[in-house]
Image (tube, grey):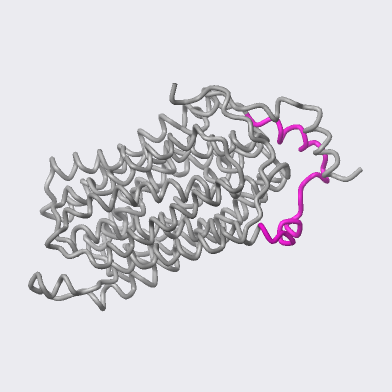
Amino acid sequence: MNSSTIMDNDIENDDSSMKPVGRRSVLCYGMGHMLNDITAACWFTYLLLFLTDIGLSSRGAASVMLSGQVADGFATIFIGELIDRFGHFKIWHGAGSVLVAVSFSSVFGGCMPCRILSTSTLTVETISYCVFAAIFNVGWAATQVAHMSMVNCITLNSTSRVVLTSCRNAFTMVANLSLYTIALIVFGVSKANTHADLENQYRWIAYSSIFIGCCFVGVFLLGTEEPRLKMGVRGNSHARISWAYWFKKILYYQVAIVYMLTRLVLNVSQAYLAFYVINDLRMADSAKALVPAIIYISSFIVSIILQEMAWTGQRLKAYYSAGGILWVFCGAGILILPGSVSSSMYVISIFIGIANALMMVTGISMQNVLIGEDLNGCAFVCGSLSFLDKMSCGLALYVLQSYQCTTAPKLMDNNSLSSYISVTRYGLGLVPAICSLIGVAVTYTMKLHTPYLKSLAEPLLE
């Protein structure tokens, strides 16, 4: 009897694996990625801005970002393989969360080696930030892979899997809103007149984010049980699914492309949002917290609504396509928006938030459809797809940021500035729009099968 037969028998003998997931379990699971989400929001929104403000070159700041993304990418593959071999999702999640909490403060807390060595050369600063960025991203990868792959082992009910993913996405919005609320308060209360003041601002943001994220992670660890579907098949030493099994599936490559493009849309646009509202639109400093907050309020509302739906493969494709097309229009608006009507960015932000939620929830859910009942390979799928995400985002940001220093406009009047298309506009408008369009095209070719259509046991909006 082969490993797939053993797994199928275990699943067939446990009808509870098909039952919808209850509200409490959904909520506890959704909280588990809060620390990762709130630190990632700070990472992509403020890291490049922070590093360039304290004196690093644009290329040096891009190197720090790239080092973290590369470390994250390779860690997801390695950790995904270990989780498939040994299981213990919660242990990996907890260990990764500890590493994230400890290392993140060192990224935004100033150059620690500079204080130890009593030197502040740009070379030492860049190396220091690169090392701590890599450490932070290794911990982030462990938490992400463990949390994402848990969905498939908690339940085989396809609608409940989408609900769990949607709840996680909703708490991603809560994390982002928490960050931007903190940032709005910090930027409003304190003024950065020196590098020390600037570092103190981001240190407060980082420490507050870590505290909030750790509280939610504690609730997740206490309220979520180790998935028993995984435990039921792990006893057989030959049960682990080989990598070649996935590489033979056309759907694997389709889902991988869509997931990578979706993450590029979210991460690249987030990385250049603060630059865009400050440098291109000349908005007030509060806008670099207020505009992202509007995006995530919209995303949060849409994510909650998506939790109440029964899902099929066709619906996943339709809603992803709707989000992608909406992003194309938003990207076009960003490219041509003049500084004289910068307030229009608040309206565009609403639609960006809606598009982000539609694409992220359905994109991750396609990944869960791909895995299906092949639970002993779920961590590899999550890890390999995340590898593509991290490497592509890191390279895209490095290339864009490398050109930032050579194409920045000189002081211009409003008319010439409005006709200038900066690297920031390309990063926030053109790149996400192109990625969205390609993602929609690939989604159209998919054949998604979702046989289990039972609804959530307890609706979340009662």
171 on left or right of 72: left
Q: Position of residue 36 (x, y in %)?
A: 44, 43
Residue drawn at x 47%, y 48% as measured from the top left = 360
Count of marks placed on residues: 0
Which quadrant does the N terminus fall into?
top right
Of residues 102 and 17, the one drawn nearer to the viewer in this rendering = 17
- Image height of 375 relative to 383, above or below: above
Residue drawn at x 66%, y 57% as measured from the top left = 251
**Residue with the most extreme left position:** 413
Residue drawn at x 22%, y 50% as measured from the top left = 346
- Image height of 103 relative to 301, above or below: below
Q: Is residue 233 magenta?
A: yes
Instruction: Tell me the magenta residue range.
Output: 226-251
For residue 421, which quarter of the picture? bottom left
Q: Position of residue 147 (x, y in %)?
A: 55, 40
Which quadrant does the C terminus fall into?
top left
452 on left or right of 337: right
308 on left or right of 272: right
Q: Is residue 209 magenta?
A: no
Q: Position of residue 322 (x, y in %)?
A: 45, 52
**Residue with the most extreme bottom position:** 406
Q: Position of residue 190 (x, y in %)?
A: 13, 43
Of residues 56 and 77, the one drawn nearer to the viewer in this rendering = 77
**Residue with the most extreme right position:** 1
